[in-house]
Image: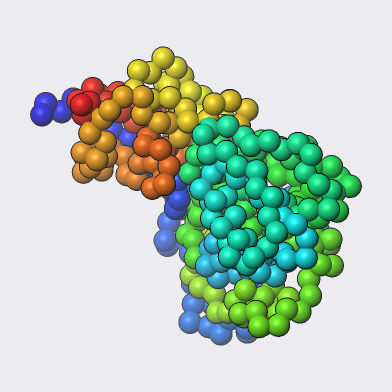
Amino acid sequence: MIIPKFKKPKSPNFSSGPTKKPDEWSVNDLNTNFLGRYHRSSDVKKFINDVLKKLKNILAIPSNYKVLIFPGSCSGAMEAVIWSFLGKKMVTAIVYDYWGVKWYEDLLKLNLKVELRKNLLGNMPDLNGIPKSNDIVFVWTGTSTGMTISNIDFIKSSHDGLVISDVTSAAFIEDLPWEKIDVSVFSWQKALGSESQHGIIVMSPKAMERLEKRNKLPKTLSIYDHDFLINTPSLLSISDFDLCLEIFNKKGGLKFSKETCIKNRSILENWAKGNQFVSFFCKKKKYRALSPCFFVFKKDLNHKKMFSFLGEKKIAFDIANYRKAELGIRIWNGSNIKKNDLIALTNWLDWSFNYFRL
């Protein structure tokens, strides 16, 4: 193998979660004052609450919405939402990515009445005519397919049921219409570049009115029984979250993040035009996520050897398709990813496609 002398990306971290940390991040800047402390101490509680207030300000979450921390990243938070809120009404499950499939399957396990709107072929399912009384569950941005729902204008402001969304890959990227979402869940390891482990639940006043005591519900799944924290958190992870929030805000917050994602995506869009080896999985541009971009292979490649080569040479880590998705390449192009790194990556990909073709 004659390896070309292309410039390599300064950072090969293009994973879609956890994602690359900000260049400005340093372990030496972490607040370690509360490590080894009881999480219900008054000063520790103040620290955590101050971080949540900072989060609300940065994301422009309405002041009358409640924000909670739950264990188990976004998955743990979403499970708590499903168990704590759903069951009395028919649920419309909108599925266009594999996390949407996961939440749909969980609804079935609880024997809930579900109306399924599903498309896993790169198009958005039919969103018209959702009954006014139904609860709605959907993923805003599907990292497994590189697709986003774009907006929720199909849901009227007079909708009676709860609107519940997994916004993990949209938070810190999209200007989310919080006033239209009753319950949203996310973790902070995507666009923010922070460590995972904990999940966030954001609830509207309408959602809080729905909460009631449910017998035999496991403690970690009961939002009703949430008292400050449902269990012991990692104060190191929360300190990292706090630091990444500070960096994000200083760089320009949501405006900076969204603009950077659009510019980064344009690099990959131009690269994909006329590319004989890959094409976007998502058929319509308006449903393509700001990040990540997911491309499927148009020709047969020795993809395992190619991904192994890219990793061994520290050109790109973890860019293979989500394990259940079609074979292809998934590239995180969020605001922590540098333009020149994306350009360098595409040069290496073009060479790799030709070298590893079958």
Q: Residue 96, located in which quarter of the rendered image?
A: top right
Residue at horizontal 81%, vertical 47%? 131
Asked if residue 352 shows in the view, the reply is no
In the picture as drawn, the residue positioned furthest to the left comes out as: 1
In the picture provided, is 85 more to the left or to the right than 343? right
Q: Residue furthest right?
A: 158
Q: Quadrant of the N terminus?
A: top left
- The color scheme shown is rainbow
Does residue 220 lie above or below 244 as drawn? below
Residue 321 seen in the current view: yes
Q: Residue at x 62, y 80 (%)?
A: 219
- In the image, is residue 303 above or below residue 298? below
Picture coordinates of residue 124, whole percent (x, y): 62, 34
Camera-side residue of 98 and 276: 98
- Circle count: 0
Q: For residue 83, what is the image quadrant?
A: bottom right
Residue 208 picture location, percent across and down: 80, 67
Q: Nearer the viewer, residue 243 or 182?
A: 182
Q: Where does residue 156 sit, x and y in percent of width and height?
A: 84, 42
Is residue 320 toward the left or the right of residue 269 in the image? left
**Residue 35 drawn at (x, y percent):** 49, 77
Q: Residue at x 38, y 18 (%)?
A: 275
Up-down relation of residue 94 to residue 28 (above or below): above
Give me the residue at 38% from left, 47% from top: 323
Q: Quadrant of the C terminus?
A: top left
